[in-house]
Amino acid sequence: MTATSKKPQLLHLVLGGELEDLHGTEFRDLSKVEMVGLYPDYETAKVAWKAKAQSTVDNAHMRYFIVHLHRLMDPDHPH
């Protein structure tokens, strides 16, 4: 990558909380869902997701997710 080229911004959101069911994705209490952060690419989001997921390993109902916002914002984009 040259100094003039710029990596495309592909927004990702990391969020999580306690789930109702271990096999589902419905949160137990939406008011307690944690917005970990917004990240410019998947790699950065994955680092944040992994840190939060590992910090809650003792609670089986706690789950964190990476949401590919760039896909929702521009569904026709090839990334």
Image (cartoon, rainbow, N blue to C red):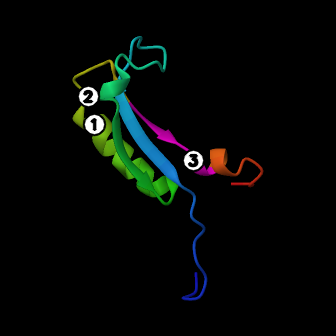
Residue found 44% across the figure and 56% down from its top: 39
Disc nearer the start of the sequence (3/2): 2
Q: Position of residue 65 (x, y in %)?
A: 44, 35
Question: The residue under label 3 is which amino acid type?
Answer: Leu
How many marks are shown on the rendered structure?
Answer: 3
Q: Position of residue 48 (x, y in %)?
A: 35, 49
Residue wearing tag 2: 57
Q: Nearer the viewer, mark 3 or mark 2?
A: 3
Region in magenta:
64-70
Question: The residue under label 1 is which amino acid type?
Answer: Gln
Q: Position of residue 22 (x, y in %)?
A: 41, 14
- Per the rendering, the mark at residue 69 is 3
Residue wearing tag 1: 54
Residue found 54% across the figure and 88% down from its top: 3
Residue found 77% across the figure and 50% down from its top: 76
Quadrant assignment for the N terminus: bottom right
Question: The residue under label 2 is which amino acid type?
Answer: Val
